[in-house]
Image: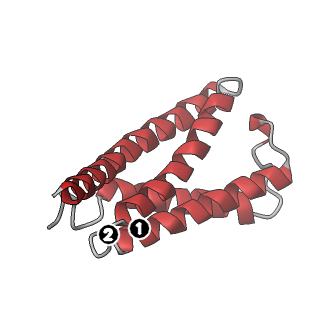
Amino acid sequence: MRLGITQHPRAGEIFLGLAALYWGAVVALWPGSPGLGWAGLDYQQSRATGIAVILSSLVLAIGCRINGRWRWSPVVRLVGVGGLTGVALFLAWHALYAAASAWAVYSFVAAVSVVVWVNTAVDVAALVRGVWDAGRR
């Protein structure tokens, strides 16, 4: 029984994961970059943020790869998207006090991340509802 979970990974999750992986690699690995000083982060904190984004992207990639083959795969996807959404919301909040272009970019990314997170949460809700219904029989 499929519980309403999509068999194939959603395009929004894949695009968000790839874009975040690229961004995280640039922030974490680019030598001599100015970092995210506008967000109040020094170089080490910027690097840690980039690594957190890379790890969240990898968790999301694992969740997309096993999607539908393991009952709890939507939870793995939700954890990956949740990490990316958390970083995006943090940066969007701090971009309010930076240049308007930073706010425009990071608020858009945060909005897209929230939409993808909600769509993934719908799959998790369908999973939980199905498990709950199956347990009551």
Residue at 80 percent across and 36 percent down: it is 40
Q: Amino acid at mark 1?
A: Gly
Q: Which residue is mark 1?
A: 63
The colouring scheme, among rainbow, by chain, secondary structure or one colour, is secondary structure
Q: Nearer the viewer, residue 34 or 135?
A: 135
Q: Classify residue 41 by image quadrant.
A: top right
* Mark 1 neighbour class, 10 Å CA radius: few under 14, some 14 to 19, many 20 or more: many
Q: Nearer the viewer, residue 24 or 64?
A: 64
Q: Are marks 1 and 2 in contact (CB under 8 Å)?
A: yes
Q: Quadrant of the C terminus?
A: bottom left
Q: Nearer the viewer, residue 129 or 83?
A: 129
- Say if 130 sits above or below 111 in the image: below
**Which labelled disc corresponds to residue 67?**
2
For the question of whether residue 4 can be seen, the reply is: no
Q: Amino acid at mark 2?
A: Asn
Q: Residue 91 location in percent, x, y?
A: 64, 38
